[in-house]
Image (cartoon, rainbow, N blue to C red):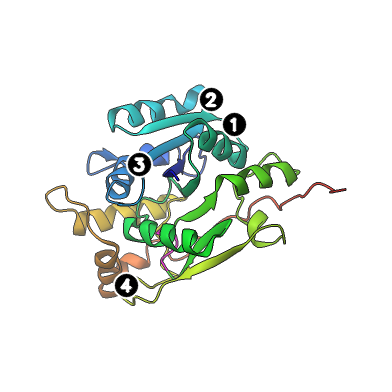
Amino acid sequence: MKSAILITARLKSTRLPLKVIKPIEGIPMIVHMLNRLKLAKTQEDIIICTSTVAQDDPLEEIAYNEDVKCFRGHPDDVLVRLKDAAEEFNVETVINCTADNPFVDPEYVDKLYFHHIKRSNDFSKIQGLPFGAFSYALSKEALTKVCNIKNEKNTENWHEYFLETDFFKWDSLVVTDERVMWEDLRLTVDYPEDFEFVQKIFEELWKDEKVFSLSEIVKLCRLRPDLVNINRNMHQKKGIPIAIKKLV
């Protein structure tokens, strides 16, 4: 049963233009993310899932240069894009993360995969990691089902289709390791303040071009509240509410 990491990525951001390819220490942010995710031991492929819009061409070039796969699909319907990518590459278990989260943890990618398979879930998430360090697991069958029942084409924020309906079996992998537990620590990149924060983390921890661990990030932030304050007041925007078709 093939499993792969599917990274949803676009270059359409308006708050922080071209954020996923902005350079950190001379390397595009998404490449730092790829270097981290390549450490996951359970995944057979990494696939950048972007759109067919010409603006996103640089993401396909990065995928080629970094020896990962690329899928180009629906610009706005992320669920359909993920489903189509899973079908194209024969992926039965999808591990999903977004390209604006450069610190997705590969160790918990592996732990989530085993949890998801053991529980025979449709959808699995992680509870306890910093915001932006987690990933999601879902089956190709669940992706097909959710695409059939949803009644909205803009599904950039799609997780509520699994969490707020009774159509899917799901639960959470609960983190108990205090070295990485910090749900309120914001490690995603939406605003210039977020990017500045991430840059500061790299300035402190990126040595000899080696991937540093999530526990090192958390330890640094506990010792340096001045860094955490950089993006403390940034908040996630609310997504479009889910919409379910009337089922007969």
Which three-letter amino acid code belongs to the residue tagged 2? Thr
The question of residue 172 being in magenta is answered with: no
Q: State if disc 2 and disc 1 touch (CB < 8 Å).
A: yes
Q: In x, y percent, where is residue 33?
A: 33, 46
Q: Is residue 235 visible?
A: no
Q: CA distance from mark 2 to mark 3?
A: 18 Å
What amino acid is found at the position of numbered circle 1 in the picture? His
Cα gap from disc 4 to disc 2, whole angstroms: 41 Å
Mark 4: amino acid = Pro
- Residue denoted by label 1: 74
Q: Which mark is residue 52?
A: 2
Residue 26 screen position, x and y as percent: 23, 39
**Residue 220, position in %: x, y?**
25, 68
Between residue 10 and residue 15, name the one nearer to us.
Answer: 10
Question: In the picture provided, is 63 more to the left or to the right than 161?
Answer: left
- Dot 3, crowdedness within 10 Å: few (<14), some or many (≥20)? many
Q: Which residues are magenta?
A: 129-134
From mark 1 to mark 2, how far is it between C-alphas? 7 Å
Q: Secondary structure at mark 3?
A: helix
Q: Amino acid at mark 3?
A: Ile
What's the residue at 32%, 72% (across, down)?
A: 225
Q: Residue 228, how many percent across, how many down? A: 35, 67
Q: The residue tagged with tag 1: helix, strand or loop?
A: loop
Front position among marks 1 and 3: 1
Residue holding disc 3: 30
Residue at label 4? 225
- Above or below, 217 against 178 in this view is above
Q: Earlier in the sequence, mark 4 or mark 3?
A: 3
